Amino acid sequence: MPDTKDTNSNLIMGRHPVQEALAHGRQIEKILALKNGTGSVKQILARAGERGIRIRYVERSELDRLAGGVRHQGVIAYAVPYRYSSVEDMLKLAAHRGEDPFLILLDNIEDPHNLGAVMRSAECAGAHGVVISRDRSCGLNETAARTSAGAVEYLPCARVTNMSRTIESLKKAGLWIAASDMDGDLYTAANLRGPLVLVIGSEGRGISRLVKEKCDFTVSIPMRGRIESLNASNAAAVLMYEVRRQRDAE
């Protein structure tokens, strides 16, 4: 039986997330797998064996119990909790790539599904990192990792104690701060080139007043249907790819 101290915060469930964790050198404590696993499960276990990771074969009922309804595809890995990066690491990454910094700042995002989805889109759009709050945000847990489809292994995520102070620091470093809000200018008409921080708030509370006051300008996505707003991760994806489009057009 697994240790009682184990929690979902350090479980990686599903073939693709476990493969990405192994490929990226994530520190894995052990792997639980179905007996007589086939296909990619065999590949996962072979790679784990090469790294000396402990493997334990279990019945499906044990995996189902640990997964708690999450699709595990016959394999669950116990990993060392995700390590956070720093904002400075993100700026260094941009400099290493020879690109203008492009960061995503999430304010009041409490749903790990949204965090994971934003990280997935951010990694695909070429962002250099995602910044979350220590107090008003969910953290990098298994749900966020699974939703990110492996992006957490490649995209830096920083957790800061004071969003307003972080924005001030980024401004001093030469970055422009763009808030996403309903009362902003049309996002396709805004200049989103150059060093940029894109600030996204939650669907319910949006961006906090203090954070919004620190932003340089505000952009909005037009709503033509009866729903008042997009899901935060969907809105973030739309805006990130507009940034990508403008950068690629230069």
Image: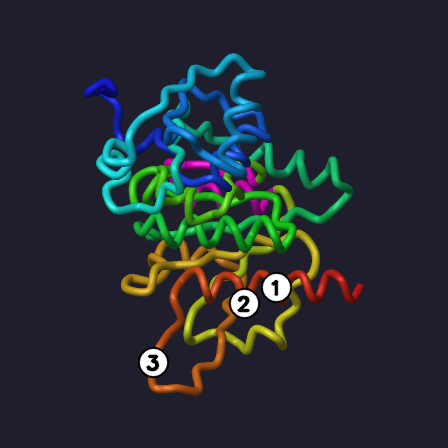
**Given the image, on which type of amino acid does mark 2 rest?**
Val
**Given the image, on which type of amino acid does mark 1 rest?**
Tyr
Q: Quadrant of residue 117?
A: bottom left
Q: Secondary structure at mark 3?
A: loop
| Cβ atoms at labels 1 and 2 below 8 Å apart | yes
> Could you tell whether 155 is left or right of 7 in the image?
right
The CA span between labels 3 and 1 is: 22 Å
Is residue 97 placed above or below 46 in the rendered structure? Answer: below
Name the N-terminal-most of marks 3 and 2: 3
Q: Name the residue at 43% across, 29% down.
A: 82
Q: Secondary structure at mark 2?
A: helix
Q: Which mark is residue 238?
A: 2
Q: Within the magenta stretch, is there residue 166?
A: yes
Residue furthest left in the image: 4
Residue furthest right in the image: 250
Give the extent of the magenta segment: 155-172
Q: Secondary structure at mark 1?
A: helix
Say how many tags the image has. Answer: 3
Mark 2 burial class by Cα count in 10 Å: few <14, some 14-19, many 20+: some
Q: Nearer the viewer, residue 156 or 102?
A: 156
Mark 3 burial class by Cα count in 10 Å: few <14, some 14-19, many 20+: few
Q: Quadrant of residue 225?
A: bottom left
Name the N-terminal-most of marks 3 and 1: 3
Residue furthest top in the image: 52
Location of the N terminus by quadrant is: top left
Q: Which mark is residue 241?
A: 1
Place of residue 145 in the rendered image (x, y in percent of width and height, measured from the top left):
43, 41
Place of residue 199 in the rendered image (x, y in percent of width and height, measured from the top left):
47, 56
Place of residue 141 in the rendered image (x, y in percent of width and height, measured from the top left):
36, 37
Q: Which residue is mark 3?
A: 227
Is residue 91 placed above or below 240 in the rendered structure? Answer: above
Q: Name the residue at 43% across, 15% down.
A: 54
